Amino acid sequence: MCKQQVFNVGNLRRVNKASQQLDQSANFFDPDNKDGNKIRDELAIMVLDQLIDWLRTGGRVAIHDATNSTIQRRKLLIDRLQQEPDIKVLILESVCTDKTVLERNFRLKLSGPDYKDKDPAKALSDFRHRVANYERAYEPVGDWEEDHDIQYCKLVNVGKKVIAHNISGYLSGQCIFYLMNFNLAERQIFVTRHGESEDNITGRIGGDAPLSAKGRKFSKALARFHKEEKKVRATAEAISNSQFTIWTSMLKRSMETAQSFDPDEYDIKHIRFLNEINSGSREGMTYEEIKSQFPSEFQARQDNKLYYRYPGMGGESYLDVIHRLQSMIIELERMNQSCLIVTHRVVLRILLGYLLARKWASVYTYYLCICSVYELRPKPYGVELTSWCYDEEADDFKELKEDASQE
């Protein structure tokens, strides 16, 4: 886990008194506008100073989010950062020549804070003018950075081409690895817990029990629901409906939940990384039994679930499972096709925590009903979440209007 934060210069520009006194239309970004350029440089340094202060007080990865599209601006920032020998710099440039992606990005800007509640046609025209001003002054990342041994990564057309220079250090390498697997494909990510198992009835943790009769009923209903829902959503949002992957764990209750899905229609994979947290020597016990027989251990887990590791061979903590899931999360980021993940409570909490950008320290507090299904749709400015809960009496799923992943 790594403490990170984004520092956006545009957010400061919109509330800064000096910049508010000037016209903030496309003319503000004209390279010939000396007053505008001066204020923009000052704001970039002000935000950089905020970023540096945050790193000094325990932050690990900070993102200076601004255009920074000229050598003069990048040199200004680098000169300031060179006064901080403990801070390593990685410049990221995103280059896009795909007209379809550009047009989509232009229209997305209309819902941003600079153009919200403004006439769409006028806003789009102004933003195109702003981009033209950027293009007039634009100097690509490359020769100057190489001459000064500065780390950089250039992402072309959302990862179709990746250029990296002088990358050193673990965090920089991990950033490049992530960017090489990143994509913006429209897709659906469904996640759910397995159906009720025999051990769920008796409250026993861990183990490898099969589904109960109720769990098998849930499995059949899930297959019916999912087939219809993916079709409806794909049609409504122009998402490809041709390929769909199902991932389960290697435990019976997870694999049996996916047995009702047609293998000719779904690519079903069983993956050990998705197994439930290993309870070590406490596998097969109930929480009441642990509390009665090992009270101090029970309390230690209550006090710090994130770091508490079950004793005995193979015992894990939440943190262990987070590290175990890293490669699966990268694969999830890389995938272009939609998927359904049938897993377990701890794993599901971690996946939702990651996809919804929640704090790891609170991930174990999410209330996840054994009969709930969550659909996540990655969007440019976050992830949209829809939740359903299985109604056993109706043998169908009902959409929940509130975020069911919270207590």
Image (cartoon, helix red, strand yellow):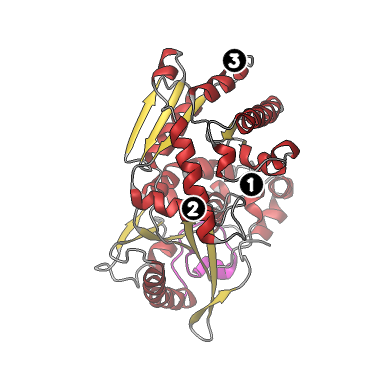
Q: Is residue 173 left or right of residue 38?
A: left
Query: Can you tell which of label 1 and label 2 is closer to the viewer?
Result: 2
Residue at image coords 38%, 43%: 158
Of helix, strand and loop, which one carries label 1? loop
Mark 1, residues whose alpha carbon is within 10 Å: few (<14), some, or many (≥20)? few
Measure the alpha-carbon separation of dots 3 and 1. Answer: 31 Å
Q: Which residue is mark 2?
A: 125
Mark 3, residues whose alpha carbon is within 10 Å: few (<14), some, or many (≥20)? few
First to last magenta residue range: 192-212
**Dot label at residue 359:** 1
Residues at discs 3 and 1 in contact (Cβ within 8 Å): no
Query: Can you tell which of label 3 and label 1 is closer to the viewer?
Result: 3
Mark 2, residues whose alpha carbon is within 10 Å: few (<14), some, or many (≥20)? few
Query: Sequence order check: which comes first, mark 3 or mark 2?
Result: 3
Q: In front: 217, or 340? A: 340
Residue at image coords 44%, 28%: 173
**Dot label at residue 82:** 3
Type of amino acid at the residue the image marks with label 1: Lys
Q: Is residue 57 left or right of residue 138?
A: right
Task: From this view, report whether residue 70 is shown above or below residue 313.
Answer: above
Locate residue 78: give its quadrant. top right
Percent position of residue 205, x then y: 56, 58
Of helix, strand and loop, which one carries label 2? helix
